[in-house]
Amino acid sequence: MLRRAPHHVEAKVTLGRLLSESSDGAERSQGVATLEAVMRRDTGLALIACAALEGYYLRIGWREEVDRVQTRARQLEDALLRGWGERHRLTANDHLTAYDLPPTSLASLRQACARRSEVRRAFLVRKRTRFLREQPCVMLAVECAVPWYRPSTGKEAGETALSLVQHVVLPEAADLLAAPVEPRSSLMRRLRGVRGALVYERAAGA
């Protein structure tokens, strides 16, 4: 799992933390308000805001606020644990939409796919999740060619997909994962049915 690209939520956490430690009362209030807003969001970054707020409220002795922040942190930790499983698998039953990359990022991914002769197709989709819905889950699904005389275990395709992930630069903070896909699987049929999801297809005979 990789975290890519700076995002405004991360910037807000950093700004809120800095302002909450300011000697200026107005700036401290602004920082705390910023962290409180992030803490309410359905994203793993809210845990960082929780930690900053807990430290702040401990320093000023507001025990009730400390308890409230700790309760929210436990909720987020539970969501992270529950969400781990759904973010590490891709199935034909998932709700999927195409994920748009900026032109330069898309070109870089396509070039990386073209350099790997075993790559036949690559799809980039966003998966709808039950937990931490404001934290996008992006999946790079890769189909690899396997010689007819060698059974496919999915291991090589998985390794190829993981290597290609390094060439994907997302325009936001998101969880980016790789998944192999078999050519005649229900998942392949599902991916081919998602408009705009196909980001690379090797030309016949290439």
Image (cartoon, rainbow, N blue to C red):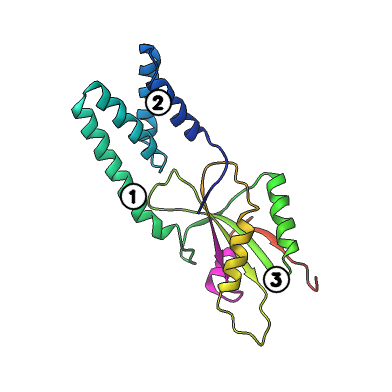
Q: In this orientation, does residue 160 appear?
A: yes
Amino acid, disc 2: Thr
Residue numbers of the magenta segment: 177-192
Nearer the N terminus, badge 3 or badge 2? 2
Q: Quadrant of the C terminus?
A: bottom right
**Label 3 SS:** loop
Most distant residue in the left direction: 64
- For residue 168, above or below residue 185: above
Horizontal relation, residue 78 to residue 114: left or right: left
Q: Position of residue 156 (x, y in %)?
A: 60, 72
Tag 2–tag 1 contact (CB < 8 Å): no
| Nearer the observer, 186 or 26 | 26
Tag 3–tag 2 contact (CB < 8 Å): no
In the picture, residue 83 is in which quadrant?
A: bottom left
Q: Position of residue 79 (x, y in %)?
A: 34, 49
Q: Which residue is mark 3?
A: 118
Nearer the N terminus, badge 3 or badge 1? 1
Q: Residues within 10 Å of mark 3 (few under 14, many from 20)?
A: some
Horizontal relation, residue 146 to residue 134: left or right: right
Specify whether residue 150 is painted magenta.
no
Q: Which mark, by number, is residue 34?
A: 2
Residue at the (71%, 45%) spot, across then down: 103
In the picture, residue 198 is in which quadrant?
A: bottom right
Q: Which residue is mark 1?
A: 79
Q: Position of residue 134 (x, y in %)?
A: 44, 43
Q: Residues within 10 Å of mark 1 (few under 14, many from 20)?
A: some
| Nearer the observer, 52 or 98 | 52
Amino acid, disc 3: Glu
